Amino acid sequence: QVQLVESGGGLVQAGGSLRLSCAVSGNIFSINAMGWFRRAPGKGREFVATITWRGGSTTYADSVKGRFTISRDNAKKMVYLQMNSLKPDDTGRYYCATLNQWLKPTNIWGQGTQVTVSS
């Protein structure tokens, strides 16, 4: 079984940057891809970015393209989300998750890390 632990969230002013980290442990050989998702207060879960575990191919939500970068370090078993030019609309709890071959989330999620962007 795979376990995920996110870190790196915090309070930042609009225009600032944060880097989120997701530590992966367990049976990493079963992982097809990883993704970051977020949930803003009163809203549903929103896709942010995905990355395949082996090839490193990435996808992004239109709302974060050009501002966020997803990456992974297979040797360290880490997945990162570099967030630049943050906006108040980026506020929410950010989660990493393992993805299936269709890049849809499985039932393996971390506990999340809170990001708050002040205007």
Image (tube, rainbow, N blue to C red):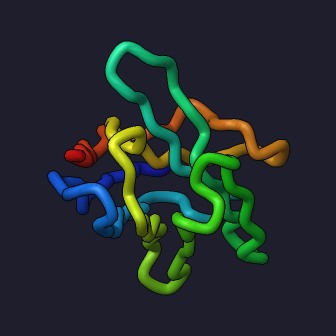
Q: On screen, 96 above or below 43?
A: below
Q: Residue furthest left?
A: 11
Q: On screen, 5 above or below 29?
A: above
Label count reads 0
Residue 15 is situated, as x and y percent measured from the top left of the image, at 33, 64
Q: Considering depth in this image, is 73 or 36 the residue closer to the camera?
A: 36
31 left or right of 4 in image: right
Q: Residue furthest right?
A: 102
- Whether residue 30 is visible here, answered yes or no, is no
On the image, which quarter does residue 104 sit in? top right
Q: On screen, 108 above or below 13?
A: above
On the image, which quarter does residue 92 sit in? top left
Residue appearing at x 68%, y 55% in the figure: 60
Q: On screen, 72 above or below 26?
A: below
- Whether residue 13 is visible here, answered yes or no, is yes
116 left or right of 79 in image: left
Residue appearing at x 51%, y 41% in the figure: 37
Residue appearing at x 33%, y 43% in the figure: 88
36 left or right of 100 in image: left
